[in-house]
């Protein structure tokens, strides 16, 4: 994985609320996720979970309306890490 590319696209200072917009593929975050997938052929899917539980994916996944990934162990771990 190209760490410098990942840092350039997704470093915490770059992940602002304005980036998320409506979370659609045309939003800035949607475009960045699609760009990352296009530049990293070994990556099949990528996602971002917002603090309010929205999950933005590339490629777009159909998730149940009540899906909240904040209950998943990997997301809980990242939330704890951010709170420190």
Image (cartoon, helix red, strand yellow):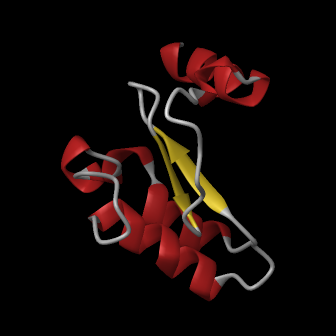
Front-most of residues 20 and 64: 64
Give x and y (percent) for residue 36.
56, 75
Q: Quadrant of residue 81?
A: top right
Q: Nearer the viewer, residue 51 or 2?
A: 51
Please tell me whether residue 62 is drawn above or below residue 35 in the rendered image: above
Q: Nearer the viewer, residue 15 or 69?
A: 69
The C terminus lies in which quarter of the figure? top right
Front residue of this view, candidates 23 and 15 = 23
**Placement of 73 over or under 67, stated as above or below:** above
Q: Left of 7 or right of it: where is 41? A: right
Q: Residue at x 45, y 66 (%)?
A: 9
Q: Quadrant of the N terminus?
A: bottom right
Residue 55 position in % (x across, y down): 50, 42
Residue situated furthest left in the rendering: 18
Image-quadrant location for residue 28 = bottom left
What residue is at 59 percent from the left and 69 percent from the top? 59
Q: Position of residue 38 (x, y in %)?
A: 59, 86
* Residue at 54% from the left image edge and 57% from the top image edge: 57
The image position of residue 49, as x and y in percent, is 51, 38
The residue depicted at 68 percent of the width and 74 percent of the height is: 2
Q: How many marks?
A: 0
């Amino acid at each position: 994985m190209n760490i410098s590319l990942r840092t350039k696209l997704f470093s915490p200072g770059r992940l602002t609320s304005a980036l998320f917009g409506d979370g659609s593929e045309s939003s800035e975050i949607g475009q960045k996720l699609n760009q990352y997938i296009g530049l990293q052929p070994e990556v099949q899917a990528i996602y971002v979970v917002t603090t309010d539980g929205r999950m933005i994916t590339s490629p777009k996944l159909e998730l149940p309306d009540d899906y909240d990934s904040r209950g998943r162990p990997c997301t809980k771990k990242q939330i704890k890490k951010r709170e420190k």
